[in-house]
Image (tube, rainbow, N blue to C red):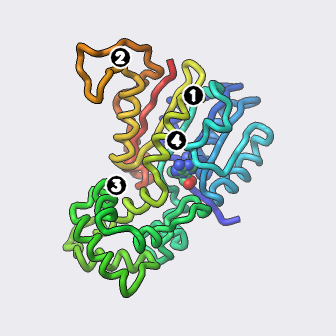
Amino acid sequence: MPAFIHKPVMLAEVLAALRPAPGGSHADGTLGGAGHAAAVLAATSPNGFLWGCDQDGVAIETARARLTERFAGRFELRRENFAGLARWVPAGACDSVLFDLGVSSPQLDRPERGFSFQADGPLDMRMDDRSPRTAADWLNQTEPEELARIFWEYGGERDSRRFAKAIAMDRVTRPFTSTRQLAELIERLAPRQGKKAHPATQVFQALRIAVNDEIGALRRGLAGAVTLLKPGGRLAVITFHSLEDRVVKEFGREQTRDYTFAGPVDVPELRQPRVPELRWVSRKAIMPGAAELAENPRSRSAQLRVLEKI
Ligand SMILES: C[S@@+](CC[C@H](N)C(=O)[O-])C[C@H]1O[C@@H](n2cnc3c(N)ncnc32)[C@H](O)[C@@H]1O
């Protein structure tokens, strides 16, 4: 089995948020290398339980092997999207649910997964290789207007239209197959000129989000997670870019509001009181500390938000 080594981000902060205690029951929707999951299971010893999923086949096998060594019989793992967590984890059974979003180091570091513009590989980017459309399929088959929308909405790419047009022209004679082919095209269109970030950074992020329907899965996953929590249970989400953080903030705002409004806009006179399902544990995002930032550069864009079921 290939090694899957991923350093869990903000481990101390996550444990402080989830408060795992002996006998507790927890869910982890993004197992990865099971760093967070192992720490949660350790803290719930001797008889705590964990439901865990990851849509990546390598991740789930690594997590299973790692957890079996120390916690056999105390977990149920499935290769699933966390959007469907509520279909198999019992409702109201969890003291916490954790989503540590995005890609893992092993996904990024393996050129054959096609996530990285740093090394050449097939233009794939699927976290779940059972899903039908690779990044190459998206790039070769999507209308240029839609590609531009994806680059702008999911990547904040200012040159989205120009890039989409150039891709649509290029693919007529040479369909896209590799990460290098895409990275080189973007570099030609937008030379680096001393800038630190690679000019294809946003395009790669946007494509990855589209290929994996990351925003749709997050919305469905958050809604499902609420149904799994016990009263007082905690939902913790680590995001890595502003788009997914905005989804979590909007979800939190919606779920913690003590009123509803009838129409599409909020008219204060028409508000109806309601009992919210959640409350913010920390309205402000929690960031990694200086020591972690120095040790693990990939933690630099991480933000943790925590909600509690009322
Ligand atoms: C940052 S890593 C998680 C690392 C993990 N917390 C640890 O301690 O090792 C993110 C993982 O979430 C998985 N993932 C991302 N979105 C997912 C989704 N919608 N459903 C299931 N797994 C997902 C990825 O495949 C990846 O393995």
Disc 2 designates what residue? 259
Question: In this figure, which residue is indicated by the disc labeled 1?
Answer: 227
Q: Identity of the amino acid at label 1?
A: Thr
Q: Which mark is residue 99?
A: 4
Labels 4 & 3 near each other (Cβ < 8 A): no
- The quarter of the image holding the N terminus is bottom right
Three-letter amino acid code at the position of disc 2:
Tyr
Is residue 162 shown left or right of residue 83?
A: left
Determine the secondary structure under disc 3.
Answer: helix
Residue 235 placement (x, y as % from top left): 51, 31
In terms of image quadrants, where is residue 244?
top left
State if disc 1 and disc 3 touch (CB < 8 Å). no
Q: Which residue is mark 3?
A: 154
* CA separation in Å, label 3 and label 2: 31 Å
Residue ID at (37%, 44%): 290
Label 2, residues with CA under 10 Å away: few <14, some 14-19, many ≥20: some
Q: Is residue 97 left or right of residue 155?
A: right
What's the amino acid at mark 3?
Tyr
Q: Position of residue 187 (x, y in %)?
A: 28, 76
Left or right: residue 166 versus residue 125 is left
